[in-house]
Each structure stands twice: as C-alpha cells, then as structure tokens.
Amino acid sequence: MREALLGTVVGLYVLWLLLVVVFVLGRYTPVPRFAVVRSSVVIGAAVLTVVGAGRLARTGYRRLAE
C-alpha cells in the first residue's frame, strides 16, 4: 500500500514539473498558453507548500519534544 501511494505521489510530482515546463514555454515562447496549465501549476505549488510546511512543523515538533 505504501509503495502504491509513493508511486502515485511521485507521478503527480513529475506531472506537475512537466506542467511547470509547459507554463514557462507558454510564457516565454510562441507556444500557446492554456488556462488549465496555469491553474494546475498554482494548485500544485499550493499543495507542495502546505505539505512542506506540515513536514517542517512535524520535524520541528519532534526536535522540541526530544
């Protein structure tokens, strides 16, 4: 179960990285822009920020609890 979850999370992260590349290409080259790409990049960044903040809070709490 844990391996499946890890595979899903890694797959979503790689998809988000590809969307970031498409977003940058749409912004700075003649490649067409897609609204769904921008929203996906923003949502992905927000999710990664929340997950990162949660991990930092958890690690910080463990260090204080020691």
Image: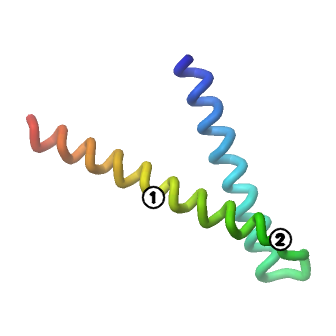
Residue 55: quarter of image: top left
In this picture, residue 62 sits left or right of residue 47? left
Residue at the spot 18% in from the left edge and 38% down from the top edge: 62
In this picture, is 45 found above or below 3? below
Q: Quadrant of the N terminus?
A: top right
Relative side of 64 to 50, left or right: left
Counting residues from the start of the chain, the first of labels 1 and 2 encountered is: 2
Horizontal and vertical percent position of residue 53: 36, 54
Q: Residue at horizontal 78%, vertical 71%?
A: 35
Using the image, determine if residue 21 lies above or below residue 62: below
Residue for badge 1: 49
Label 2: few (<14), some (14–19) or many (≥20) C-alpha neighbours in 10 Å: few
Label 1: few (<14), some (14–19) or many (≥20) C-alpha neighbours in 10 Å: few
Question: Dot 2: what SS?
Answer: loop
Above or below residue 65? Residue 3 is above
Specify the color scheme. rainbow
For the residues bearing labels 1 and 2, Cβ distance under 8 angstroms:
no
Give me the disc on residue 23: none
- Pick the front one: 35 or 63: 35
| Location of residue 16 by image quarter | bottom right
Q: Residue at x 74, y 60 (%)?
A: 19
Q: Residue at x 26, y 43 (%)?
A: 59
Q: Quadrant of the C terminus?
A: top left
The residue singled out by tag 2 in the image is 34
Identity, as a three-letter code, of the amino acid under mark 1: Thr
